[in-house]
Image (tube, rainbow, N blue to C red):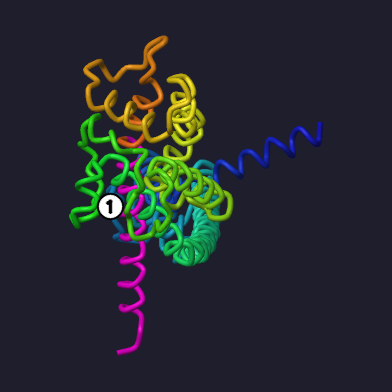
Amino acid sequence: MIEKISNRLKHFFHVVSNIRPIVWIALYVALVPVFALIYWWLPDSQFRIPDSAGTDFGSWVYYSIVTITTLGFGDYTPAHGWAQAVTAVEVMCGLIFLGFFLNAVGSMRSEIDVESELEKQRRVHEATETEKLLRNIPVILHKLNLFMAYCYAVTTPLADRTAGKKLEFDPDFSFSDMRDLYKPSHIPADRTMRPAVEGLLRSSADTSLFLDSLQTRIDMTLWPDLLNECFAFVAECQMFSSTDAIVGHPQRLARKMGDVSDKVAETRIADSIQQWKGGMEISEDNPMNPFIELNSYIRDNGSRAAAIEASLSEIAAKSRRQDLEVSPK
C-alpha cells in the first residue's frame, strides 16, 4: 500500500515537473482575480476594513495580491470564519503554485544542462568521426577514380581510348560501346595488358570491400546521403553474379569453336556486342545475359561512384573552410 502511494506520488511529481514554468506562473497570477472575486462576494463584515477604505473589486484585487504574496500589510484583515478560511486557502495555493514554479524552473535547468551535455558529446563525436573520414578520403577517392577509369575503359571503344581523349566516364554510353571490353584498358594507372573488364571487376571488388569496411569503422549515419550511396554501391557489387561468366567467356568460347585462339573468340564476342539488337532485359538462355548485367551494373555503380566522390569532396572542402574560419589571422 505504501509502495503504491509512493509510486503514485512519484508519477504525480514527474508530471508536475514536466509542466513549463510559464504555466505555473500564469496559474499563480490567475489566482489573484479569482480570490478577489470571492472576497468581493463575501460580506464586508467578514473583514476589518480601514476607515474610508474601498470595498470595490479593485480593492479586493489589491488584498488578494498582498495575501497570495504573503506580504500581509495588515490594512485589510480577515475577521471571521469564511474570510479567514478563504485567505488561508489563497495563501496555501500561492505557496504551492510558487513551489511548483520553482520546481519546474529547476527541472527545466536540469533539462537544459542535459541537452547541453548531449550537444557537447554530439559535437565531439561528430568531430572525431569527421577526422576519421578525412583521413580515409584520399584512399577512397583514389579507389573511386580508378573504378570510374575502368568504367570508362570498358564502355569506350579501343580506338577512342588510345586517341588521347579525356578520360571521363560517360553514364550514357551505348551497349555497343562495350565491344572492346576484352582489350587492354590503356588507362595511366594500368600498365598491364590484362582485359579492361578484368581490371574493372577487380577494382569494383576492391572499392566495395573498402567502402564496406568504412561503414564498420566510421559512424556514417552522420552523412545519411553518403551512407545510402555507399550501401547501394556495396549491395550492387555483391549482387553482381556474372563475374566468372565474363572473365572466362573468351576461353570457353574458344574451346567451343574448336580450340581457336582467345583473340578470335574475343573478336566474335566484340562482333556479338556490336550487332546486338535485342533488349536490355535478362532472359532465359540468352548468351548476352552477362554483358547485359554488366551494362546495367556499370551505369548504376558508375553514377554512384561519381555521387560518392562529389559528397566526399564537399565534406573535405567544408572541413577546410571551417579550419580557415577558426585559424588565427
> Which corner quadrant of the image does residue 322 belong to?
bottom left
Q: Which segment did they paint magenta?
A: 300-329
At a point 31% along the width and 79% down the height, the residue shown is: 324
In-front residue for pair 319/139:
139
Q: Quadrant of the N terminus?
A: top right
At a point 45% along the width and 48% down the height, the residue shown is: 203
Q: Quadrant of the C terminus?
A: bottom left
Can residue 68 be seen from the camera position used here?
yes
Q: Residue furthest top?
A: 284
Label 1 neighbourhood size at 10 Å, few (<14), some (14-19), many (20+)? some
Which residue in the protein does label 1 denote? 58
At a point 38% along the width and 29% down the height, the residue shown is: 265
**Image position of 275 with respect to 232: above or below:** above
Q: Position of residue 266 (x, y in %)?
A: 36, 32
Residue type of the residue flagged with mark 1: Gly
In magenta segment, residue 74: no
Magenta span main SS: helix
Can residue 71 be seen from the camera position used here?
no
In-front residue for pair 284/181:
181
